[in-house]
Image (cartoon, rainbow, N blue to C red):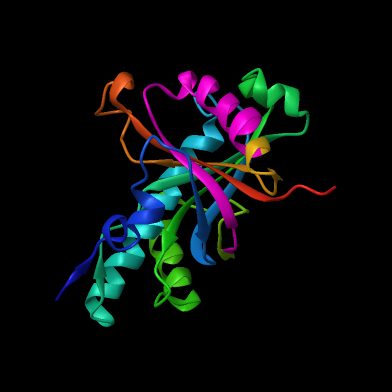
Amino acid sequence: MEKIDFRKSLKHLYDPTRTVSLVEVPPMQFVMVDGAGNPNTAPAYGEAVEWLYSVSYGIKFASKATHEHDYVVPPLEGLWWADDPADFAARNKDNWRWTMMIMVPDFITRDMFEAAVTKAGKKLGSPPESLRFATYDEGASLQVLHIGSYDDEGPILKRLHEVEMPARGLTFNGHHHEIYLGDPRRVEAARLKTILRQPVRPKGP
């Protein structure tokens, strides 16, 4: 049985360079959880990530066993914003809002998701209220690879928002999106790889 690795089959979306590129992101299915607060200290963040991985691996194993499709669980992703954009720019993390998510292949069904949630609940208890199986349609986006600490993203985001977007006649069309290619528990901060993605649309007159 062939194991699908989406970082290879969707290389243009999951393996960018340090040069800003414009990509068209198709509608994709995700397991998602919403939350708020500093991801380094908010208990809800840790709970969200634990549920996402537990459910995603449950789906993967069920897919391999009953549907003869095996795949590598894709990396953790996050949408980030703040009610006051200044709080996001100033990295006032206590005021941040987020949606953490992990992509699931298009051959995965809602029934498989619900079965995985039930199985995970036997270990984790009641799931977060916002835990869901949903499609995210991101569309046209600028993305770039950042290497280093999450807290060092400022300069590259400034270039993306204030140089690249205006030069291409583009403006914002959705929340800041990050895709985590490294595990901060195992990789030193200076070597972490993170895809920074910003949905965009043509700027009006």
Q: Can residue 127 be seen in this view?
A: no
Is 81 a magenta residue? no
| Vertical arrangement, residue 113 with respect to residue 128, above or below | below
Which is nearer the eye, 29 or 131? 29
Which is nearer the eye, 29 or 117? 29
Magenta-highlighted residues: 136-165
Q: Can residue 129 be seen in this view?
A: yes
Quadrant of residue 56 within the rendered picture: bottom left
Is 159 a magenta residue? yes
Residue 179 vs residue 184: left or right?
Answer: right
Which is nearer the eye, 82 or 170? 170
| Vertical arrangement, residue 52 with respect to residue 85, above or below | below
| Vertical arrangement, residue 84 with respect to residue 68, above or below | above
Residue located at (24% from left, 73% from top): 64
Residue located at (29% from left, 63% from top): 9
Report the residue that reaches farthest toward the right: 205
Residue located at (38% from left, 55% from top): 12
Horizontal and vertical percent for residue 5? 26, 61
